[in-house]
Each structure stands twice: as C-alpha cells, then as structure tokens.
Image (tube, helix red, strand yellow):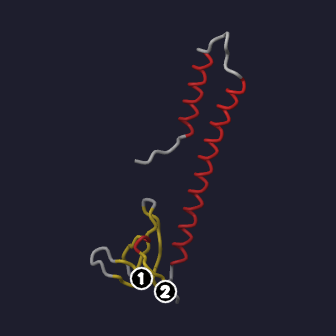
Amino acid sequence: METSFNSGIAKTEFLHLLTIQLRNQDPLDPVKQEDFIGQLTQFSMLEGVENLNASFKSMLRLQEISQGLNLVGKNVDYADVQSGEIKSGMVEEFYVEQGIIMLVIGGKSISVDLIVGVKAN
C-alpha cells in the first residue's frame, strides 16, 4: 500500500503538535529557539520535497503524453491481450483513460504498455 504525504494535513498536525508542545512546556526549561527553528526547517524541507515530487510527476505526465502524441501516424507492434500474438498496425489517435495512455490502432483501443516496437515510416 502506497501512502503519500499530504501537506495540508501535515501542516495542521504540525501546528497542532507545536501548540501542544508550547502550551505544556516547562516554564523553567522552555523550548530552545534552536530546537524550534530546527523543527520548522525539517518541516519546510519535507514540504519542499513534496512540491518537487509533484513537479516531477507533472513533468513525467507531460512526457508520457508527448510520447503518445509522437506515436500517432506510426506503425507499431503490440501484444494482443486476447490472443497473446504480436500484431501490427498504425496508431490512429491517442487519449488518456483513468491516467493510462491509450492508443487507437485499427479501431481498437490499446494501452501504450502493450507496445513492443515502433517501425520507421
């Protein structure tokens, strides 16, 4: 099971914990400013990594769509799921269905994952 970091929830939880920590600290031994800054820095770094991952995910998606678009008009070999045979055909169009790049070859929708080769025209 894959879990993902949710910055909105994490921010709320972090601020909630920080408030509890500050409220319950020993007045004779308060949290040191360096510790507080360290916690904020760690949280900020984690949020930055999440934003970077989101950017990479968007870039990867754009690259996948570009690759699908570049296959339109090309002859490809693909694995037929029903027969298990390798078949050939020209990519007529592409679209995205539930996050998966689909190609239309000979009127049939084929997942881009089933492409095993591309032929030069």
Q: How many marks?
A: 2
The amino acid marked with disc number 2 is Lys
The amino acid marked with disc number 1 is Asp
Contact flag, marks 1 and 2 (Cβ < 8 Å)? yes
Q: Is residue 110 above or below residue 28?
A: below
Residue occupying image coordinates x 72% and y 27%: 34
In the image, 41: left or right of 89? right
Residue that label 2 marks = 119
Q: Residue furthest right?
A: 33
Residue occupying image coordinates x 64% and y 31%: 39
Which sits in the foreground, 38 or 15? 38
Residue occupying image coordinates x 67% and y 13%: 29
Q: Residue furthest top?
A: 28
Residue occupying image coordinates x 45% and y 81%: 117
Question: Picture quarter containing residue 103?
Answer: bottom left
Which sits in the foreground, 17 or 27? 27
In the image, 107: left or right of 7? left
